Amino acid sequence: MNADVLEIKTEQLLKTKKRSQLFDVWLRLKKSKAAIAGLLLIGIFIFMAILAPVLVSYEDDALKMNVRVRLQTPGSDHWFGTDELGRDIFARIVYGTRISLFVGIISVSIALTLGGTLGAIAGYYGGKIDNIIMRFLDVLLAVPAVLLAITIVAALGASMLNLMIAVGVSNIPGFARVVRAAVLSVKDQEFIEAAKAIGAKDHTIILRHVLPNSMAPIIVFATLKVATAIMATASLSFLGLGIQPPTPEWGSMLAGGRSYIRDHMYIVLYPGMAIVLTVLSLNLIGDGLRDALDPKLK
Amino acid sequence: MRNKVLEIKNLKIRYVTDDGIVEAVNGIDMLIEKGRTLGLVGETGAGKTTTAMSILRLIPDPPGEIISGDIILDNIKLLEISENEMETIRGRLVSMIFQDPMTALNPSICVGEQISEAISIHQDVTKEGAKEKAREMLEIVGIPGSRMEEYPHQFSGGMKQRVIIAIALSCSPKLLIADEPTTALDVTIQAQVLELMKELKEKLEMSMLMITHDLGVVAEVCDDVAIMYAGRIVEQGNLEEIFKYTKHPYTEGLFNSIPNIDDRKAELIPIRGLMSDPYNLPDGCSFCDRCDYALDICQTEKPKKIYFSGTHFSECHLYSGNSDFQLNCGKK
């Protein structure tokens, strides 16, 4: 009887303890007001992206041209006004959220997978392999990221997939460097040597022992990079190399509205604000995460 | 002939760095029989850890390289097999306990998983089976199995060292290398951990190579002792021979540096000077600059092994012409 009670108590104790690591990070993140504001903002954007079909109609509001209501100022019919072709700007921003977030996340995933793999291999093995991989990436890094992305899109043709590839590839060197640095700081610790001493293979050591212990800087960098990727997407679309009209995308909305900026500035104001707010919120979250994941900074 | 578990013959290891060549291990021989414990004693930089790492073939290369010699573990010539074969030997035939338990465990994986990892690498078991065995190992080293899911930071130093012992022993290796396993622990925990290791060694019938600079630990757990200085074994023998019939001046110096519990006011007699520069070892005996008995020949010629019994030898010129020579043994 007594033993049972004790058993249950230890079980409970274990459960609270087990959760604690992630929970601790959340508690520290919660302390940062800026990070919470960022989380709220990005939450709103994600909410908009998911509920887009419920909020507005893609065909009728975001795509269909209606010259009778062109260039309307914001009002109760059209919250953010209409553009030069009579399309509802709010609807286009809502659908644009989907594209921006999707492209941002996918292109960062591409960069993280490829760059991370290269960086982990370079950092773990060191020596010649490290030199070859990093010098190659240095060459890639010498070309400005946006220029590189423009070249890739120009070569492959403008489409959403190519845009993601372009933004992803131009981010590979950055991720490789961050992952390599993180791996370097972990790989000489004794538990790595201990893992070797029990006969673990290299890939097991990298995947199970090195990477999980170098996650903190990688998570922070990835969060910040999603913001940059969203900006890059908007820039390329603004230049006509990304998402093609009439698909609603923030950057191409800016491009379309820029000739009307003098009399109808809301056409570019709202998409511009959408870009700024997404990027800002992601940066705030990134900064908050950096503090939360590194207890030494407290 | 008793069963040899580990035999090292004329092992030479050096590190090639930009500043020069460090001769870390200069031709040592070693023999550990089944069920015996050899204590490898020496000061920092004597080459103890390098010797141990060479048995696991984990010497970082570059800069380290094994120049010559043979390491034979359980009739396998370790220096001649491939890296893949070596991976199947590490952890199964030989495993290692590290000096600092605080850093030798992966902080992001719970301890149960770390033990079962070692098991599933070398044994053909299911995930559940490995977990069950891990729980068993944890209980063997005196930690309740219910703490399987906990992370290393939730354990104290002594507990962590127990976990590390559990990992090292999980595949019942023939040889356990313990690299200063108690240096980072306080004295009471030291005694517990040593007791545990001794007990498990007997239970699992393994041999052990105990690296330490604490002669107290040696007296506690070892059967044989090898005294290492500047990459050579300068004196070797069984426990009694080394402790009672000390032959080498360096060994004597080590004993003189231990506080005497019966006479607490007695001054310690440290060994004067520092260990000779490993970049530039002298031609003669490496210890002669610090030796109170040094002869002229010590400067110029390397001493040879002189046997006092079947097991006890010392590398010192003092005995070459005069086998009855006696050290002062602290009486100055």
Image (tube, coloured by chain):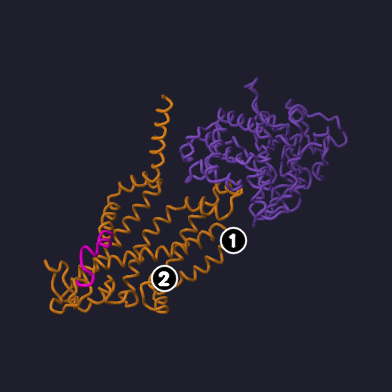
Chain colours: A orange, B purple
Residue at horizontal 29 percent and vertical 72 percent from the top:
A251
Q: Is residue B136 above or below residue A29?
A: above
The residue closer to the viewer here, B278 or A68, is A68
Q: Position of residue B104 (x, y in %)?
A: 55, 43
Residue A113 visible? The answer is yes
The chain letter for the residue carrying disc 2 is A
**SS of the residue at dot 1?**
helix
Is A51 a magenta residue? yes
Give the total number of marks visible in the rendering: 2
- Which quarter of the rendering shows the N terminus of chain B? top right
Q: Which residue is mark 1?
A: A127
Secondary structure predominantly adopted by residues drawn in magenta: helix
User: Residue B219 sits in which quadrant?
Assistant: top right
Q: Residues within 10 Å of mark 1 (few under 14, many from 20)?
A: few
**SS of the residue at dot 2?**
helix
Q: Position of residue B62 (x, y in %)?
A: 64, 56
Amino acid at the residue labelled 2: Ile
Point out the stretch of residues depicted in magenta.
A46-60
Q: Position of residue A65 (x, y in %)?
A: 19, 77
Tell me if B1 is positioned left or right of A66 in this view. Answer: right
Is A97 a magenta residue? no
Amino acid at the residue labelled 1: Gly
Q: Which mark is residue B132?
A: none
Please report whichever mark, 1 or 2, sits nearer to the chain's N-terminal start: 1
Q: Which residue is mark 2?
A: A165
